[in-house]
Image (spheres, rainbow, N blue to C red):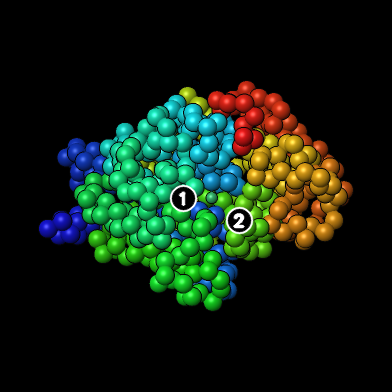
Amino acid sequence: MKSFVKSYYHQILSLRVGMIFLLLNIGSVTTIQAQEKPNIIILFADDLGYGDLSCYGAQDVNTPNIDQLAKEGLRFTDFQVASSVCSPSRAALLTGRYPMRNGFPVAQGKIEKHKDYGLHPDEITIADVLLKEDYATLAIGKWHLGFNEGHQPIDHGFQHFYGLQSNWHTKHPDLDDVYFDRKPVKENVPFETLIGDYTNKAIEYMEENIENPFFLYLAYHSVHSPIQPSKEFIGTSKGSLYGDYVQELDYHVGRLTQALADKNLDENTIVIFLSDNGPALCHFGGSAGPLNGGKYTTMEGGFLIPAIIKWKGKFATGVNDTFLSSMDLFPTLTSLAGAEIPKDRVIDGKNITSILKTGKGTSPHEVVYYYNGTNLQAVRKGKWKLHLPRTSEDQPFWSKAENEKPFNGSNLKNIACRGLLVLGRPLLFNLDQDMGELTDVSKKHPEVVKELLKEAEKARKELGDVNSIGTDQRVPPFENIQEKI
Ligand SMILES: [Ca+2]
């Protein structure tokens, strides 16, 4: 019955123009607008690198389902997240604001010091906005934005939550428990069972909400550690266990996209697939493709991620090289749902609806900032990216490099996974010609260096830096936030 209703509904949608004309004439346009609100699914992979999918050039991994999504949608080659670690990247995606602005610049841990650390209650998330627009809202999977009162998914616009507080771990008794809303419903859950369980829940949810708009935020643990695919996937890729793990993620993305097609939801659902940060190269492998650095760094390998956006029949298709940000999703989805973008705060993301619809247009971002924790480490303006000097003390706990000599600008090929850590002088890269950040051109373009240093100063004033507080910075509620202990 439901599928009949849906298929009938889609026949109506296909006659949209005629219907709108007709309804305008009888004065009931509001009804049709309400029906046209698209379902929205964000599939958020964890630590998946720019070079980890076959549609992004991976040779030893086969990801046919994600590749198919890319063929049917827009595949972006210059799409950034706002942090190269999990929590701040998630906070920025959900709020459309830099982690320094929204108060979540450092990854949250299950430690005493972080007991009051979570996404601030005053922050507005995509879920908050969509809930007000009568969307059903559900978060599945890894939260990692604080799990104490006030910081849980259902405190941030999600009607329901099904998943883990943070990364799966057996070190702490709560971290391998699956929660429904605020309570644990399954304890000591084996890691390999989560991905299938989450996908099943997501498909059930689509079925339950087939007749009203829904927002599904599905944050898979794959391919974050533990690199532990299910048995059926071990040995399936030409690569390592990591490749098998990527292929398992692809399989479950395929289950979801197939379920959407089977339920005739394709034409009324926006599917967004992206990763939260680059690969943890030094620890677990993965690939950042042609990029330098990975997770924990402010090089492109940490910030540029695979990103695909599809809305069948509504958005353009093909490969798109416009420079965009995960923060753009907040204002874009707000606008597509017919809601107002909040005016009482700065939203760093831009509404990219027209780029999505036409596949054309220039980047809406004049300048972007790269923070590592609370340390401003780089600024990008157009094709230019300037890395700023920094010491080991400036860095957050995950990228301290004590006793490391300042990098002098040579042998950039050799820095690989660790990125640029301690830096004695600014380094300039032309990303149009050198997206791998291999050739420092600061001496050739002193005027560009000067201009970008000014932009860095503006960022420091507004968003702060490791030793200063910005005019529009939400400061987390504890001392020495970059230290774990
Ligand atoms: Ca991550």
Mark 2 near ligand 1 (CB under 8 Å)?
yes
Which numbered marker is on residue 280? 2
Q: Residues within 10 Å of mark 1 (few under 14, many from 20)?
A: some
Q: Residue at x 22, y 50 (%)?
A: 208
- Left or right: where 65 falls relative to 85: left
- Residue 449 on image: x %, y %: 80, 42
Q: Nearer the viewer, residue 438 or 228?
A: 228
The kind of residue tagged 1 is Thr
Q: Earlier in the sequence, mark 1 or mark 2?
A: 1
Q: Is any atom of residue 318 visible in this view?
A: no
- Left or right: where 364 falls relative to 260: right
Q: Nearer the viewer, residue 68 or 295?
A: 295
Mark 1 near ligand 1 (CB under 8 Å)?
no
Marks 1 & 2, CB-CB < 8 Å contact: no
Q: Residues within 10 Å of mark 2 (few under 14, many from 20)?
A: many
Q: Is any atom of residue 174 visible in this view?
A: yes
Quarter of the picture containing the N terminus is bottom left
User: To which quarter of the image does residue 335 belong?
Assistant: top left
The kind of residue tagged 2 is Ala
- Left or right: where 35 falls relative to 70: left
Please tell me whether residue 140 is drawn above or below residue 26 in the rendered image: below
Quarter of the picture containing the C terminus is top right
Q: Nearer the viewer, residue 170 or 482?
A: 170
Q: Residue at x 39, y 29 (%)?
A: 149
Residue that label 1 marks:
170
Q: Nearer the viewer, residue 373 or 284?
A: 284
* Tally of numbered tags: 2
